[in-house]
Image (tube, coloured by chain):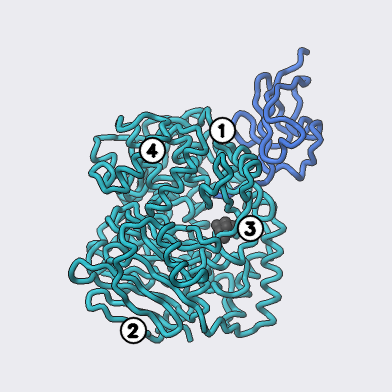
Chain colours: A blue, B cyan
Amino acid sequence: MAPITVTIKLFAHFRHGRFKEADHQFPPGTACRDVILGLGFRLGEMGIVMVNGQHAPLDHPLSERDTLALFPLVGGG
Amino acid sequence: MDKILRVNMTDLTTRVEETPAEWAGLGGRALTSTIVAKEVPPACHALGPHNKLVFAPGLLSGTAASNSGRLSAGAKSPLTGGIKESNVGGTAAQMFARLGIKALIVEGVPPGEGWYALKVGKDGVTIEEERGLLGLGNFAVIDALQALLGKKTGVIAIGPAGEMKLTSANISVKDPSGKIRSHGRGGLGAVMGSKRIKFIAIDDEGAPGIQIADPEAFKAASCVFTKALMDHPVSGQGLPTYGTNVLVNILHEAGGLPTRNFTHGQFDGHEQICGETMHDTIVARGGKPRHGCHAGCVIQCSQVYHDKEGQYLTSGFEYETIWGLGANCLIKELDDIALADSVMDDLGLDSIETAVAFGVAMEAGILPWGDGKEVVRILREEVGKGTALGRVIGSGAGAVGRTYGVTRVPVVKNQAIPAYDPRSVKGIGITYCTSPMGADHTAGYTIATNILNVGGQVDPLKKEGQVELSRNLQIATAAVDSTGMCIFIAFPALDIPECLPALIGMINARFGAKLTGEDVTGLGKSVLKLERAFNLAAGLTSADDRLPEFFCSDPVSPHQAVWDFTNEEIDAFWDF
Ligand code: SF4
């Protein structure tokens, strides 16, 4: 099957030495967890994982043109 | 035994009173709300002689407990018509506590046209006539008082907005660097202006200091508490590094960043104003990315922001202000927003109310969207000089909407809705509706659980669980606001089991008390109910516990979410 394109957005210190936003290609059905580990993160570092602006579990399978946003545990108000 | 200072501005007398037994176990918000509920006739005019302005440090203020230096101010609000408590960092709470002052109550309105200052010290409080500092901004007032009374003097002051009794006027409190923190919301600066008090100077020379009933137990609990604050990733790393402004990108991504006066949930200029950009800008210009609003804050979410030339521009530059002028008014230049923040601090204006008022003003066509320079001009030339337009803007979002016939006016109880869209983050909508304070995110910060995954996860786009979430957080917050603690201790308190017992342990050790977790929850509940009862007696009804109509009819992008709670569902909040 053809690979899917996913836009990955990184925030706060996750950007250091990586990128802000980039399109990556993956095999269909790739889960958020695979992408996170593939970028060299530990799962314990993840604060918020969003797919298309909604919170998603780590085993959520990604689809063509999804946007995956990864935040460390930060916050305030 | 701590004492109550009472100032009567009608006959210009002052008294030192014993603390009544029923107030002995109260501090901060619990005490200001109890005093306001007992002594202020709910139906009185908020700017008239029957309103009272009450200041109270928290139960733990002045002790070595981390993050405990917050001061509560309370009164009937001229903005909402209901009860108000607003708390602040700065140096005043700790000075009051060391002086053994449980509360300062200011009542009455002076005869004639004169202005006054209060001087608080170890022998009580005196009233002096004031002329020289009238009309000056907060920064000049603090500089002048430091030159006159010494660097260590505490200052609580109002700017020109408070002198004009504008309903967005705040009360400024000097911070440890001689800059400003604010009792921001609800127009308490107008109440201070109605009593014609330009400033309160505090001298804690010779103060008796704090008596701790059980110093050993206090020390032990305090260590556990501080460790919890440092261990939690939000309070230990996130807030110190990026401040609260890290939320711009999070709320943008979640579709909850109110944009263009609450028409969209995302802002295309988010990267220009976000916490990441701000952090890099601060570091590049030699500012300070972390800074505490009071001595003893170990989280230090604040920062010092410099201009392009590397000169001080502003501090305490919060997400809500940056959102309000940024996404909500479409201003993309962080430097313009920082300058406006500093001008609002100087004039003594609530930066949330005023930013939302500008959004409504842009919708009304008074100034172009995104025009940061014109915002600064209007602040200085119109609000600062008290022109008719300036007074309308300085009276808040509701006043601008009524004056110019705008229907999209984001307020609850006439207080501006802050930086989280209630359609796409529904828990915070319940807090906006039901808080006795009017729309106030800090009253029950559901963003923690709706968005940040702190204290569990409740889907922000669904209705399920939101009323209960908001209720639990509002009860806990009412209790925390009474301890003198900064609300950001809630992040570790929600996730780290030892944190809350350590907080209660410190209160018990300080007073020789035996409070349990249930007692503290009970305190939170009773404070909320007391405040609600005041509001009902003042003439507010459950019809005031509602969001404006447009939230129900206009979907917000990108999730096309609307506000869809029934009145019964909202009113169920009060079933406790
Ligand atoms: S965390 Fe921020 S608001 Fe809280 S006490 Fe520290 S500087 Fe003040």
Taking B115 as reference, is B84 left or right? right
What residue do we see at 51% from left, 47% from top? B313
Q: Residues within 10 Å of mark 4 (few under 14, many from 20)?
A: many
The part of the image, by quadrant, that contains residue A67 is top right
Q: Marks 1 and 3, Cα distance to the nearest angstrom?
A: 25 Å
The mark nearer the N terminus, 4 or 1, is 1
The residue indicated by pointer 2 is B15
Q: Marks 2 and 1, Cα distance to the nearest angstrom?
A: 53 Å
The part of the image, by quadrant, that contains residue B218 is bottom right
Image: B69 above or below B137: below
Q: What secondary structure is marked by label 1? A: helix
Q: What secondary structure is marked by label 2? A: strand
**Mark 4, chain letter?**
B
Q: Nearer the viewer, mark 3 or mark 4?
A: 4
The mark nearer the N terminus, 3 or 2, is 2
**Mark 3, chain letter?**
B
The mark nearer the N terminus, 2 or 1, is 2
Residue B375 is marked as 4
Residue B49 on image: x %, y %: 22, 69
Taking B451 as reference, is B42 left or right? left
Q: Label 4 is placed on what type of residue? A: Val
Q: Label 1 is placed on what type of residue? A: Gln
The answer to whether any part of residue B563 appears in the image is yes
The residue indicated by pointer 1 is B272
Q: Marks 2 and 4, Cα distance to the nearest angstrom?
A: 44 Å
The residue indicated by pointer 3 is B299
Residue A37 on image: x %, y %: 80, 34
Residue B261 on image: x %, y %: 40, 35
